[in-house]
Image (cartoon, helix red, strand yellow):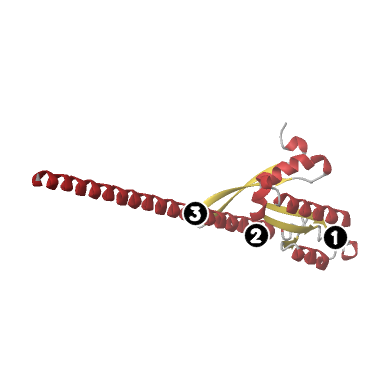
Amino acid sequence: MTLQTVGIYSYNKKKTFDNLEYNFTIFDTSGTERQRSIVNTTIQISNGYFMVFAVNNRRSFEKAIDWINLIEEYANLEEYANLEENVLYLVGNKIDVEPECREVAKEEAELFAKSKNIKYFETSALTKIGINGAFEEMFKDVYEMYKKINEKNANEHFEKNKKNNKKKTNNYFGKNKKDNKKNTNNHLEMNKKDNKKKSN
């Protein structure tokens, strides 16, 4: 069974940051109940998410909110701990529709996004408005997150090595101190015996 068979499509995009090339894999799914278990697995292996709804369909907005809340719940679970560092965007699509056809106002979506401390974008898949900008912002934010995590891990590794080296140094000096004390005591005892022997 392929990803396409169950309604999940993937695309690759190469981007360069700090003179290094990175390959981003983009998964595209509708997020329906039928696909929930598969989407759950995709969430585990992903670093960034677009929660997309149609501005002329309030139900799709409510479903996007449900998915955002679900990701927040997952982030509190040990097996989904990586979600704490991930990038999440809310995207209002189909802004090409007539204003009177909108069921979700831009201000409402922005207010919700702000309450969740996530970014909000508006796009049109039909006219391509906002699409590139949203993806470029996602690539940049995921890279910055990746960079931050690597720096954090490097610092933790450095501190761990620092503690281990300090422990080894203390053990070394402690052992040498004990050995030197033992050698000194043995030397004094030997001299004591020799002096006693000479006296006799």
In the rendered image, the vertical position of residue 135 relative to residue 105, given as above or below:
above
Can you tell which of label 1 and label 3 is closer to the viewer? Answer: 3
From the viewer's side, name the closer residue of 192 and 175.
192
- Any part of residue 130 in sight: yes
Count of numbered circles in the view: 3
What residue appears at the point 78 percent right and 66 percent down from the top-left corner? 110
| Residue 154's disc number | 3
Query: Which of disc 1 and disc 2 is earlier in sequence?
Result: 1
What residue appears at the point 41 percent right and 52 percent down from the top-left corner? 167
Q: Secondary structure at mark 3?
A: helix
Quadrant location of the C terminus in the rendered image: top left
From the viewer's side, name the closer residue of 179 and 152.
179
Circle 1 residue: 97
| Residue 128's disc number | none
Estimate the x, y position of residue 48 in percent, counting from the top left: 67, 52
Amino acid type assigned to the residue bearing label 3 in the image = Ala
Estimate the x, y position of residue 133 in percent, counting from the top left: 67, 60
In the rendered image, the vertical position of residue 172 relative to residue 124, given as above or below:
above
* Residue count near mark 3 (Cα–Cα under 10 Å), binned few <14, some 14–19, many ≥20: few
Q: CA distance from mark 1 to mark 3?
A: 49 Å
Side of 168 relative to 191 (left or right) = right
What residue appears at the point 82 percent right and 40 percent down from the top-left corner? 34
Circle 2 residue: 137
Can you tell which of label 2 and label 1 is closer to the viewer? Answer: 2
What residue appears at the point 75 percent right and 62 percent down from the top-left corner? 116
